[in-house]
Image (spheres, grey):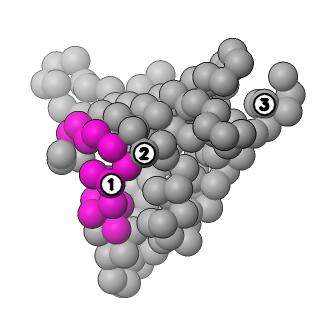
């Protein structure tokens, strides 16, 4: 079990590395060809790895913007060739002039072992909403 946990954890580690390196190809390589994504950003639902390419390239290749990503509070559950990981994810972007934007997401990934390698087959991100006005809360984990 420890080996499997570290292998699933390595997918999350490579996710962070790909975002920090602004490497869309490395990020896309973590996903299965038949991935299903529920996202905060439009389009809110995507089917298949190819549907993510344009969005990821636009995000990670924004000129002059340095991307960062931190994944915390990771919980991994695994049974055979299927695993689920959930975590808090802080995305940030430093723009020219050192202007920084950031937000916390809650993320859940379902992974399947495909020919010995873990691939993300489902990703679901969310943010909590404030009770009085139903506005998204980007500055916390909603806990």
The correct choice, above or below, for 134 with respect to 103 in the image is above
Q: How many marks?
A: 3
Q: Report the residue marked by disc 2.
A: 33
Question: Is 42 placed left or right of 38 in the picture?
Answer: left
Q: Which mark is residue 67?
A: none
The residue wearing badge 1 is 50
Question: Residue at coordinates 18% horizontally, 47% vertically from top-left?
Answer: 42
Q: Quadrant of the N terminus?
A: top right
**Mark 3 surroundings within 10 Å by alpha-carbon count, few (fewer than 14), some (14 through 19), many (20 or more):** some
Q: What SS does tag 1 mark? A: helix
Is the residue marked by circle 2 packed among few (<14), some (14-19), or many (20+) residues within 10 Å? some
Residue 10 belongs to magenta span: no
Q: Which residue is mark 3?
A: 4
Would you say residue 54 sits in the magenta stretch?
Answer: yes
Where residue 54 appears, as percent x and y from the top left, is 27, 63
Magenta segment: 44-57
* Residue extending furthest toward the left: 133
The image shows residue 121, relative to residue 65, as above or below, that is above
């Amino acid at each position: 079990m420890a080996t499997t946990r570290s292998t699933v954890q390595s997918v999350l580690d490579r996710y962070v590395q790909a975002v920090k390196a602004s490497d869309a190809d490395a990020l896309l390589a973590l996903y299965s060809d038949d991935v299903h994504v529920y996202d905060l950003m439009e389009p809110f639902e995507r089917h298949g790895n190819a549907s993510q390419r344009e969005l990821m390239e636009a995000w990670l290749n924004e000129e002059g913007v340095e991307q960062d990503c931190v994944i915390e509070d990771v919980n991994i559950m695994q049974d055979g060739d299927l695993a689920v990981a959930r975590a808090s994810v802080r995305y940030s972007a430093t723009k020219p002039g050192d202007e920084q934007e950031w937000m916390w997401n809650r993320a859940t990934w379902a992974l399947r072992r495909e020919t010995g390698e873990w691939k993300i087959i489902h990703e679901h991100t969310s943010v909590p909403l404030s009770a009085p006005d139903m506005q998204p809360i980007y500055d916390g984990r909603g806990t």
